[in-house]
Image: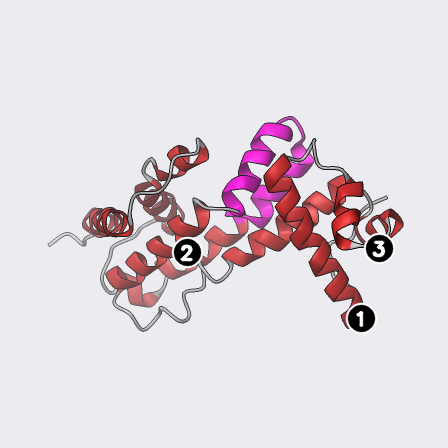
Amino acid sequence: MQPSLKLAVRPSTVVKQQKILEVATILFLEQGYRDTALDQIVQRCGGSKQTLYRYFGCKEGLFKAVLAHNLESLEDVFDFSEKASLPVESCLVSFGQDYIHRLCTNPVLGLYRIVAADFHQHADITDFFLANGPDKKHQYLIAYLASDKVAQQLAIPSPEQACCNLLALLKQDFFYTTLLGKPLPDKKCLDQQIRQSVSAFIRMYQPAR
């Protein structure tokens, strides 16, 4: 049985599903995927295990829904419409600050740990994570880097490669150190390093004079 990841239309059902997703997220992050039982989720949410099966199909279907729900929260990070009025460098600094804070903290960081630890041999989950996370969200950054506004300032022959370069500059070692349980640097230090990363990116794509 294939789980449905779409929320039902009825408001009461939407509320129930949202509560299940929120509780499941907390338990998965606290205990990991394997050590979290559906009975625990039911105990905290109320209702029955049959309700979970009806909404999500199975435990793996619930985890997919948790991934989709939390990865959707990255949409606003990659939404450049509100930043479009900013100068390119300021826009990318603002994006970088939001991106690192969201990528390197829970729930996204913790869910990445679970996917890497428990599903590295399950292509269905890893493909789902990539499709709903990096593959989808990076397209918004690529579109911005390909925009006329950016083209007026930077010479970017491949927006796709430029996207990879910018994200690599921004992430530095932050992602891997937080993945291992280390905290992010304090705000002042982090902001300074993000600005330096964006400056390096701008220099990389400065038009030849």
- Inspect the magenta stretch and tell me whether residue 116 lies in it: yes
Q: Secondary structure at mark 2?
A: helix
| Quadrant of image for the N terminus | top right
- The quarter of the picture where residue 165 lies is top left
Q: Residue at x 59, y 35 (%)?
A: 114
Q: Secondary structure at mark 1?
A: loop
Q: Nearer the viewer, mark 3 or mark 2?
A: 3
Q: Which mark is residue 49?
A: none
Q: Residue at x 70, y 31 (%)?
A: 34
Left or right? Give the position of 20 relative to 144. right
- Residue occupied by mark 1: 10
Where's residue 134, x and y in %? 51, 46
Three-letter amino acid code at the position of disc 3: Gly
| Quadrant of image for the C terminus | bottom left
- Inspect the magenta stretch and tell me whether residue 28 lies in it: no
Vertical placement of 110 versus 187: above or below?
Answer: above
- Residue occupied by mark 3: 47
First in sequence: mark 3 vs mark 1: 1
**Span of residues in magenta:** 107-135
Where's residue 136, x and y in %? 54, 52
Three-letter amino acid code at the position of disc 1: Arg
- Residue occupied by mark 2: 141
Give how far apart the Cα atoms at labels 1 and 2 are. 34 Å
Q: Residue at x 38, y 61 (%)?
A: 144
Q: Nearer the viewer, mark 3 or mark 1?
A: 3
Where's residue 124, x and y in %? 69, 36
The front one of 116 and 48 is 48
How would you classify the magenta stretch by its main secondary structure?
helix
Do callouts 1 and 2 mark residues in contact (Cβ within 8 Å)?
no
Vertical placement of 78 versus 193: above or below?
Answer: below
Tell me the crowding category of disc 1: few under 14, some 14 to 19, or many 20 or more residues within 10 angstroms, Cα based.
few
User: Would residue 9 be seen by someone viewing this image from the given angle?
Assistant: no
